[in-house]
Amino acid sequence: MVTTVSRSHATAPDTAPRRRRRWRNSFTAYLLIAPAVGYLVVLLLFPLFRGIQLSLTDTKLVNPAGGDFVGAENYTNLMSSGQFWNSLLATLIYTAATVVFAVLLGTAAAVFINRPFRGRAGIRAVMTFPYAMPTVAVALVYVWIYNQSGGVLNNSLGVLGIGQTGWLTDPQWGMFSVVLATVWKVFPFVMLVMLAALQSVPEELYEAAKIDGAGPMSTFRAIVLPHLAPTLRIVALLMTIWSIRRFEIIYLLTGGGPVERTNTLVINIYRRAFSDQDLGVAATIGVLGLVLSILVTLVFFGVERRESRKEAAA
Amino acid sequence: MPRIRFDKVHKAFGSNTVIGEFDAEIGDNEFLVLLGPSGCGKSTMLRMIAGLTDITSGELTFDDERVNDLEPRERNIAFVFQSYALYPHMTVRENIAFPLIMDRFKGWYHIPLVNMVMRRRLAGMPEVAEKVAQVAEMLELTDYLERRPKALSGGQRQRVAVARALVREPSVYLLDEPLSNLDAKLRTQMRSEITALYQRVGKTFVYVTHDQVEAMTMATRIVVLDRGEVQQIGTPAEIYERPANEFVARFIGSPAMNLVPVTVQDGRVRLDENDQPTVTTGATLTDGTYHLGVRPEKITVDPSQERGLAAQVSAVERLGGETVVGFRFHDVTQDALLSAESLRTTHFAKAPAELPVSVGDRIGVEFDLSTASWFDPRTGDRIDRETAVASATS
Amino acid sequence: MMARIVGRAFSFTSLAVLVVFAAFPIYWMINTALSTDSELYRTGQSWWPTVGRIADIPSVLSDVPILRWLGNSAVIAFGTTLLSLALAVLAAYALSRFKFYGKGVSAFFLFATQMLPEALLVVPLFALFSTLGLLNELHGLVLANVAFTMPVAVFILKNAIDAIPFKIEESARVDGCPRWGQLTMIVLPLIVPSIAAAAVINFFDGWNEFLFANTFIADSEKWPASVGLASFVGQYSTPLSSVMTAAFLFTLPAIVFFLIVQRQIVSGLTAGAVKG
């Protein structure tokens, strides 16, 4: 038996079979991921670049393959059009309102439902129905609830002596009505995620707070909220991105009206493309909307990094 | 049954060396234990034999055939994982049969749905079913064949893992800390079961553990590893009696070997820790400082202080069958007892159970120098008396 | 003591308000479906449904071709789920178990799709599909849906695979099971609950999808229920009770399936969100 303990570690020569094996390993990985990535390249990335390309042309719907290169003309036109800025403003209002109310309502619901009580499972199930309901069905119901003459909202308010409001037709109320329906649809998502986060708060923390004599409000602020903060940030990000993207419910309730009050960027794209048949301008708005999403995400990751650095320092 | 040879086997993850350069040979029918603290590279070594981890450089041969680039199944080995790694969705029977079914699997059987049909058919083959029944019988698992791993106790899971290894009749068994998830009593029982299994199947076993008791009781040969470097290879007796360096000396044995700083002058030994009458070494050592290594059972404690060096008792652990006496050559004070320094200068002796000593007593201690080891205090390496003589005469 | 009673009363009231808020529109859909036309358009809708109207449901099917539309929706949803999961299982396995150059980029690419507004892509996709002759085809719609549903499934499945101890696959490898077998015989059976969750999520993305269907499918015979029902928004020539009954039939499977796999959906969504 030979025993030599050498302390010299020559750098490993990359032997041919080893290289072959490593290559085979990577090759398997590429083989596995190629269908998914290839699929997305063809159906997302390629259309995305096509969209950016379209935004530099004056392509019309009647002839999608044609259209002349017009440079940044679509962009400069949009920048100087009040309609575009109005649309951006509608997007910001819609996004801010939905995110704030959905997160508040969802978190509150999660807190109320977190403690055990009889029938909790049933109540939780009922509260998640809106999230499971198809958007088109939501729109149908809300259009009827909001209906000016036979809708239950006006009927009930009429009993209280409040006048008949055109919830979806009055420019003052259009955005409110759309946000309300949206919040109703999405708050259960926030609730479910926050509920999961709440249940991961270690029981000892509550007990420690109790021993320290903290009341329910101060316990929530000092113990629960810091624990929820990372989840809250992610939920807020998802809600924001989804709100910027959201199409169906706005399109079905108001179609961007009344008087373009709910004409968000996404609705604007669709109307420009399929009503005005102006694909070039529609694509331009789309590119600007995407830039907005990316900016939001970057801000989020900036905040996230600062927070995690803070936590690491603490 | 192959002879496993390591030829300058080296493993690095990136620039991080895990195994230095390892040369060794594992003979037929050996029970080789890879022993070391966690992170010493012992599991990596085992995984390299199995083919689960690539070898960065050097050569691993089974009977002079290079196996570096062979898949695990081409090496005819079995592997028992620390976590057992049973298939949670299969019954015990299916778990044990799995290696046999895989041996008989053809490429086209892997087509989805076909694989389910073929697995069932292969499991029903008499040669497979009989082999599974036979192994289950041997490991007393027959009553649990239709259970899933979740419904088994730790010891039963352990047996299923062994059964799964056994069923293919491999020529090498590789076991990665297979007992560390069991409680102390079960561990002792499984230890003897594995030893019995080794004697019964008569194949090569390579066994990884950080537990020196397992190593001492089961191994035919032990490799002691630390930080990716081999510290010593030898039989349990060799490693216990003649540790190659201070690391091995401290790692093996409970309590560990005492390492006492001494100075040798003119064939006489003097303690560095306080001035005591000197004794002859009984061996030829060049003048200089040494660490004297003495096993606790090679120290005689004399409560009457008539013989040996004067010391003071700092700890007494009565284990029933014997008593471990901790003593210091410095004075024992309450403050000093808690310091790290005092731990380093406390030595331990094994004494008869009924020895009448208590903490604070002054005692005499006598070292059996004929079995003692001598270490170079700078390198920590063992100094054999023969070498000492040789260097003294040259 | 007093404070505790007030606190209890406060949370009970809040909870009651929330439940009414969440449940009322659904109740109202059912109530409307079970109301007579004269109630709806003249005398005013009652707060309580007319239970006897349940008997009239079959006549709804002649007012609204809902069964055909639901059939189209089901075809789209099944197609979307199958294609999406087939792609996602392989990609998730690669992302979870392999190291390869470009892994980070691939993962980022998958996440980035969550930011793309469908409305931006609908224009170039419309152009692409018109050249490929995929407009007005249900399978064309499946292709478009999968681009958005598959990344979600990848997240859910990757997290599920990450949670399986790698040693189990290594054990299979020692037992002579090749890579593909490790995926099909070890990994997939162990992540069945997550596959079910991903399947349900994808199924209802396909079931509910409106934008692409509304843009790409012109033929009302091929409409899915989402587009078919949307055609009744703000249109009153079809009895509202029939429309609401159809909407209810469209909603029912979504809610039932959602309840069945709610737990997995939540953990899938949270995991996907946190790992994003």
Image: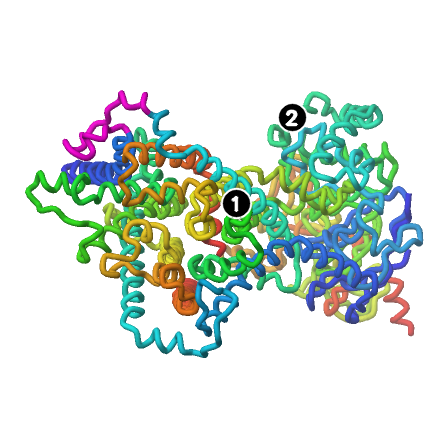
Q: Residue at x 32, y 38 (%)?
A: A127
Q: Is residue A32 magenta?
A: no
The residue lying toward the viewer, choosing from C207 and A72, is A72
- C-alpha gap between disc 1 and disc 2: 46 Å
Which residue was labeled with disc 1?
Answer: C138
Front-most of residues C140 and B145: C140
Q: What element carries label 1?
A: helix
- For badge 2, the amino acid type reads Arg
Label 2 sits on a secondary structure element that is loop
Relative to A274, does residue B235 appear above or below in the rendering?
Answer: above
Residue A189 to residue C257: above or below: below
Callout 1: 10 Å neighbours few (<14), some, many (20+)? many
Left or right: where C70 falls relative to B157:
left
Whole-percent x and y of residue A265? 35, 63
Residue named by callout 2: B147
Q: Mark 2 lies on which chain?
A: B
* Residue at the extreme right: B64
For residue B45, say whether it is visible.
yes
Which amino acid type is marked by label 1? Leu
Q: In this view, does B263 lie to the left or right of A83?
A: right
- Same-subunit check for callouts 1 and 2: no
Judged by depth in the image, the label closer to the viewer, 1 or 2, is: 1
Q: A203 or C98, which lies in front?
A: C98
Residue A213: % across, % down: 25, 47
Q: Which chain carries label 1?
A: C
Q: Which region shows up in magenta?
A: C34-56
- Based on the picture, tell me whether residue C42 belongs to the magenta stretch: yes
Instruction: Specify the quadrant of the image occupied by residue A34.
Output: bottom right
